[in-house]
Image: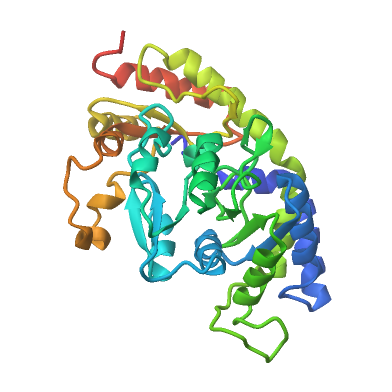
Amino acid sequence: MIPILDLTEQYRGLKSEIDTAVTAVFESGHYINGPQCKALEDEIARYIGTKYAVGLNSGTDALHLALRALDIGPGDEVITTPFTFVATTEAIGIVGATPVFVDIHPQTFNIDVGALEAAITPRTKAILPVHLYGHPAAMHDIMALARKHGIAVVEDCAQSIGATLDGKRTGAIGTIGCFSFFPSKNLGAFGDAGMVTTNDEALAARIRSLRAHGGRVKYHHEELGVNSRLDEVQAAILRVKLPYLDRWIASRRQHADAYSRALAHVVTPPSETPGAFHVYHQYTVRVEDRDRVQKSLADAGVQTMVYYPVPLHLQEVHSAMGLREGAFPHSERAAREVLSLPMFPELRDAQRETVVDTLKARVAQPVA
């Protein structure tokens, strides 16, 4: 089976460095909010291009605490896309706010900025764009609208670390950037981990307090917070991996380019808009009769994934919104057609070529 992702090869390549870093943490006896976490925060801030970074225990908490730090809560609205992982709206719901959906642009899978302004109301407190699959959203237009209406922008960068728009990294464009270091991400820990980035000192300080039970000083608590600290073991592993990230992204882009050239007349490959630097967390194509094609590929030994089969407005968790099929047609069509192919830096050329040949043989009618 050619896997969608193989994390074992990456570990084998870095085994000595990772084992040494993790052993040093064990021997230090310092496991929470220690020197590894602080060093990683500094390194991520430099990499992204922000003044501050705050380590957290997951990308979901990054979104949640970003909204908390912005004082978003009951009665407020946050505009986002229905074509994303549920953590995006989960964070909105946790703070008591209401998600307002805007359909995606069919080429990028990201929120359609042309439909964005019509969704803004007096209750809108933030726009939450998702840089889906590693392609930056249209942040210039989003930021212009945010400035016009005086609202915040929380970037969901869970899949886009290293991606840029006109040379500026995602996570450094909006008010706050939210990152996940889940093991499958382009920069992945060996468990859950996350981070926020910002240029706002007050927001960074608030999130540091919220992650530690709502207190800036130990045993002194100013508000209800959570326990969302990035542990030293995960920080040490991420510090080993970070210097390799750009090299891994370059490998992903080489595989993506080869896929696109080989599949251009077979399926609809992903696009890259002018000024955008796509990091291909996923290489996602559109395929008619997707479910049949996916099963056929699996039978032939090629693993693929569907991110995501049901858009959020049609999920049971959001049924109270009363939205029905047809509300966001581009998201609904994407959910029926998207198929992510094997994509990881260590993917061998021969494996990629097998994926291409197998897919070509199983697509009923190649596109013109």
Q: Is residue 306 left or right of residue 68?
A: left
Nearest to the observer: residue 18 or residue 214: 214
Q: Quadrant of the N terminus?
A: top left
Q: Is residue 366 left or right of residue 185?
A: left
The spot of residue 362 in percent (x, y) is 29, 21
Task: Spot the residue most to the top.
Answer: 368
* 263, 91: nearer the viewer: 91
* Number of callouts: 0
The reply to whether residue 258 is in sight is: yes
Q: Position of residue 191 (x, y in %)?
A: 58, 62
Q: In the rendered view, would you say 6 is above or below 288? A: below
Residue under the point 64% across and 65% down: 203
Question: For this rendering, which residue is in front, 325 or 253?
Answer: 325
Give how far across and how far down residue 68 sits, in percent: 52, 69
Q: Residue at x 63, y 69 (%)?
A: 207
Q: Is residue 96 left or right of residue 234?
A: left
Residue 338 pos. (x, y %): 34, 33
Does residue 182 sit above or below 211 in this rendering? above
The scheme the figure's colours follow is rainbow
Q: In which quarter of the image is the C terminus?
A: top left
